[in-house]
Each structure stands twice: as structure tokens, then as C-alpha cells.
Amino acid sequence: MSPHDGPGHDHEHDHGPHPYQPDIEDSGYTERMVMAQAVEELLIEKGIITADEMRAQVELMDSREPALGAKVVARAWADPAFKQRLLEDVNKAAAEMDIDTGHIPIRAVENTPDVHNVIVCTLCSCYPRLLIGLPPDWYKSRAYRSRTVREPRVVLAEFGTEIADDVEVRVHDSTADLRYMVLPMRPAGTDDWDEDRLAELVNRDSMIGVSLASEPK
């Protein structure tokens, strides 16, 4: 559990539900960007990885979509044994479905009637990209990163997600060494649904925790 876990982080904010995230072209290279480029060039120069291999990995990350994570969530809803394995080790559970989530550990945190989880990366934008696709711009914004740990209920309300006062809100801070995903609650009225149909109720934001799974129609 992150050091920011807990319900007591509320304050006010005047931004909209998707805080402004400037384009990367709006400013020059940061020190970290220069270092990342230097490391990439050094790895290629030393023959540790080729430019084609680097490109292939970037394209792989860019090609991933939230639908992969939705399939995993749907399987967990439909199969209690799989759900337990998912909560123990997301990477291994996803591998059972032939989904490669990379080497960085991912931890699933389960929403219940008593607990609502939300994910943030306070330092940058660490995120389980290979499982749920590229992070949205607002996830990378300074406003979201700073406010979510202080006033999660207010931030959630801006996304249209009202959390009852008797429900504990836990904020989990992703890092370079550990990523999180939310296992949203299964909507009522879906007991006889198959996995493909269940997956349609799971969206990216519900796996970050800023929204709930969609209600069945």
C-alpha cells in the first residue's frame, strides 16, 4: 500500500476534470529527457540493443490498448480463482491470457463497497502501459499528480465520480519499480454475462480509479 493510502486527503481546486497538460513541444528538453536519449544512443552504440529493437518496443507500447486490461478485469469478475491470482500477481495472471505485461511488477487493488482505489504517479507518469495502453494527458499533468494525493474525493468528483463519505478512498502512488491497476467492482445485473460482454463495461478510467465500470444497458 502506498504511503498516500487513506481517506483524509481533501482540498479545493479550480481546474476542470482534465487538468491542462502542455504539449512536450512547448518547452525544451528536460535533463531527464536528455539523459534518456543519451542512454538510448549508448545502448545502441554498445550493441546491447539495435535501433530496430528499440523501435519495435516503442511501437509495441504505442499499440497497446485498454481493451487488454478490460479482458483481464472481465476474467477476474467471471472466475474467482483467476481473480485471486490476479490480486497476487498481475503479470503472471495476465500471462495466462497470453498478455505480455513486461518485467515491471503490476499490483491490482480491488474496489469494494467499503474501499475505492485511485492510481497516481506523483513523480512523473509511471503507468502499466503494456496492460492498459498509453496514459491520458491528464494523468501526466502536475495538477492531477499533486492534487490526487491531497484531495482525492474532489478530483474524483470532477470526473463525475462521487464517493460516499463512508467509503474509504485509497490513493496508490506508482513508481518506476511498481505499477498499479484498479480492479473495479462488477456492476450489478451482470451475473449471467460472458467475459466478452463484461469486458465492454470496463474502461481505461475505471482501471485508473477515476471512474466506475459502466452500468449495463
Image (cartoon, rainbow, N blue to C red):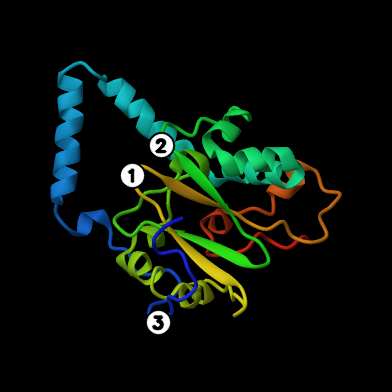
SS at circle 3: loop
Front in this rendered view, residue 75 or 44 = 75
Query: In the rendered image, which residue does mark 3 sit on?
Result: 11
State the image coordinates of residue 87 (x, y, percent, origin top left): 59, 44
Query: In the rendered image, which residue does mark 1 sit on?
Result: 176
Query: In the rendered image, which residue does mark 2 sit on?
Result: 104
Q: Residues within 10 Å of mark 3 (few under 14, many from 20)?
A: some
Q: For the point 37% across and 82% down, which residue is it?
A: 14
SS at circle 1: loop
State the image coordinates of residue 98 (x, y, percent, origin top left): 59, 27
Q: Name the kind of residue labelled 2 in the image.
A: Ile
Front in this rendered view, residue 110 or 137 = 110
SS at circle 2: loop
Label 1 close to label 2 by CB (< 8 Å) = yes
The answer to whether residue 59 is above or below residue 78 is above
Tell me the distance, in whole angstroms, between the alpha carbons under discs 2 and 3.
33 Å
Q: Name the kind of residue labelled 1 in the image.
A: Ala
